[in-house]
């Protein structure tokens, strides 16, 4: 039999449906892969029995001739930001240690309703704050990739969805959920040679997803290829009355409408994204991406997004400000960690709990956010950042008069060694420089692999689309995917 762990969502779904193999056989294969991959530290919680129980339910439905759903029999990894009923959910933070939700997030419930099964909860940057998966309270996730020169330096899988990207690239699961606040689906996808899409803000419910920055957070799929992303997004998305920001729109059949024929489409190339410090090999891949899209029938046009250089500093005011507000609920009173020194009062308990429970990066962002929201600085920082956000969104609105989709690099470099940027948070933040503008504007954006650099590490290209036009983004991604022919995967060293 084919190695089932080499199959993606579509192949597994169709194989289970036509009886080529059972959902239990698929789940057993992936459970074994997960069990043998502890050196990657991708999974915080493994749920093999739960996965097998769900797989057996899928096989029972098939035996009765019932519909198996959009993802019938597909085992996935669940980022530890999504609340899962009866399974510990920590957001990779000590302050939520031992928290077991009594409810299911809307996104995860949608996936179970579609026939997917859960292999476990995936490691991540603490509260989704990070770009390298080094801020987790439970240890770094290690990328399955290694440089081709034989160096053994452990590499970053990207962040915050680094557990998701590493698990997919290592063939521990065919797909996983991610969340993207300022690039946390797209950047790790680029670092590990997989695909990932952040849909339009509001496409996927945020209910039951632990909040970082509420006006930016958006769930999305991460998978082996564009088709699998289209299938999984169709299962995840949908209107949710429990989420005030949820879009009350029908979910299109993105898979059925996939096409790499871009005749009549215009692809915008933003001149401001050619930034100093970008790896020359990234710029070369961008040029190659233009050629591929032109070959697919698209017209390449130059565009300007003049406020791009202000997007990153605006993001690092708005996101910490919202984090400061959202994380105020973690006080040691209702759930999670409680530090209560002898003789301490309420304020002492708050301080001790947060000092012990939050990691350094979370503390840094909460302090920044509290500062910019304070009475003396609110107008000088937060209000100005919101004005910049409006200007960034307006740049995109004007660009759509000239193009249908935008092509840009996903990030300025390939993956870097873990620990290499520990003392340089500003350089770490620059990893999101190409991803943040689309997040501020709430636009759909996707990263697809386009090749390997000279060190044998994956590179990704980013596509940004109009509001609600996930189809245009997916189709352009498919055009690149077919022409890039990317099939590389890391050599197995972890078991």
Image (spheres, rainbow, N blue to C red):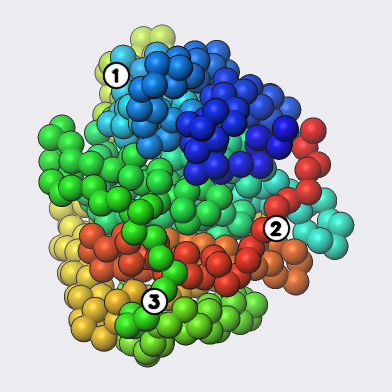
Residue under pointer 3: 262
Residue at horizontal 45 percent and vertical 65 percent from the top: 477
SS at mark 1 in the image: loop
The relative height of residue 415 versus residue 215 in the rendered view (above or below) is below
Real-space CA distance between mark 2 and mark 1, rounded to the nearest whole angstrom: 39 Å
Residue at horizontal 69 percent and vertical 67 percent from the top: 452
Residue under pointer 2: 488
Residue 153 makes an appearance in the image: yes
The relative height of residue 320 versus residue 359 in the rendered view (above or below) is below
Q: Residue 41, image x and y in percent?
A: 64, 33
Q: Residue 437, image x and y in percent?
A: 34, 68
Residue at horizontal 20 percent and vertical 76 percent from the top: 397
Q: Report the disc number at residue 103.
A: 1
Between disc 2 and disc 3, the foreground one is 3
Q: Residue 286, image x and y in percent?
A: 54, 79
Real-space CA distance between mark 1 and mark 3, rounded to the nearest whole angstrom: 43 Å
């Amino acid at each position: 039999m084919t190695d089932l762990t080499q199959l993606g969502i579509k192949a597994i779904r169709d194989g289970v449906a036509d009886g080529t193999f059972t959902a239990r056989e698929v789940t057993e294969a992936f459970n074994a892969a997960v069990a043998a991959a502890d050196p990657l530290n991708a999974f915080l919680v493994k749920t093999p029995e739960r996965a097998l129980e769900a797989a057996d339910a899928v096989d029972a439905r098939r035996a009765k001739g019932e519909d198996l759903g959009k993802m019938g029999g597909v085992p996935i990894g669940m980022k530890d930001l999504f609340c899962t009923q009866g399974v510990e959910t920590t957001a990779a933070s000590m302050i939520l240690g031992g928290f077991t939700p009594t409810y299911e997030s809307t996104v995860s419930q949608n996936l179970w309703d579609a026939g997917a099964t859960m292999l476990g909860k995936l490691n991540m940057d603490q509260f989704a704050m990070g770009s390298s998966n080094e801020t987790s309270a439970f240890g770094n996730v290690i990328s399955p990739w290694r440089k081709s020169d034989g160096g053994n330096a452990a590499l970053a899988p990207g962040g915050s969805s680094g557990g998701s990207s590493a698990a997919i690239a290592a063939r521990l699961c065919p797909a996983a959920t991610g969340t993207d606040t300022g690039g946390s689906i797209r950047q790790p996808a680029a670092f590990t040679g997989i695909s990932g899409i952040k849909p339009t803000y509001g496409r996927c419910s945020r209910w039951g997803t632990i909040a970082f920055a509420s006006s930016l957070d958006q769930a999305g799929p991460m998978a082996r290829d564009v088709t699998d992303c289209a299938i999984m997004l169709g299962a995840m998305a949908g209107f949710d009355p429990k989420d005030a920001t949820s879009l009350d729109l029908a979910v299109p059949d993105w898979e059925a409408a996939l096409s790499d024929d871009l005749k009549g489409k215009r692809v915008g190339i933003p001149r401001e994204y050619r930034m100093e410090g970008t790896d020359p090999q990234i710029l070369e891949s961008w040029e190659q991406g233009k050629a591929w899209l032109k070959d697919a029938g698209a017209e390449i046009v130059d565009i300007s997004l003049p406020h791009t250089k202000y997007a990153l500093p605006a993001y690092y005011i708005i996101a910490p400000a919202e984090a400061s507000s959202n994380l105020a609920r973690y006080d040691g009173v209702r759930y999670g960690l409680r530090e209560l020194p002898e003789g301490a009062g309420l304020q002492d308990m708050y301080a001790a709990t947060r000092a012990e429970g939050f990691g350094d990066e979370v503390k840094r962002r909460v302090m920044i956010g509290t500062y910019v929201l304070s009475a003396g600085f609110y107008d000088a920082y937060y209000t100005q950042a919101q004005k910049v956000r409006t200007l960034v969104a307006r740049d995109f609105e004007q660009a759509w008069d000239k193009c249908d989709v935008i092509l840009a690099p996903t990030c300025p470099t390939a993956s870097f060694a873990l620990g290499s940027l520990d003392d340089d948070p500003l350089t770490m933040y620059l990893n999101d420089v190409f991803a943040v503008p689309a997040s501020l504007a709430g636009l759909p954006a996707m990263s697809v692999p386009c090749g390997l650099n000279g060190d044998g590490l994956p590179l990704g290209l980013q596509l940004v689309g109009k509001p609600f036009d996930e189809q245009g983004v997916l189709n352009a991604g498919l055009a690149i995917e077919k022409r890039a022919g990317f099939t590389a995967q890391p050599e197995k060293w972890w078991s």
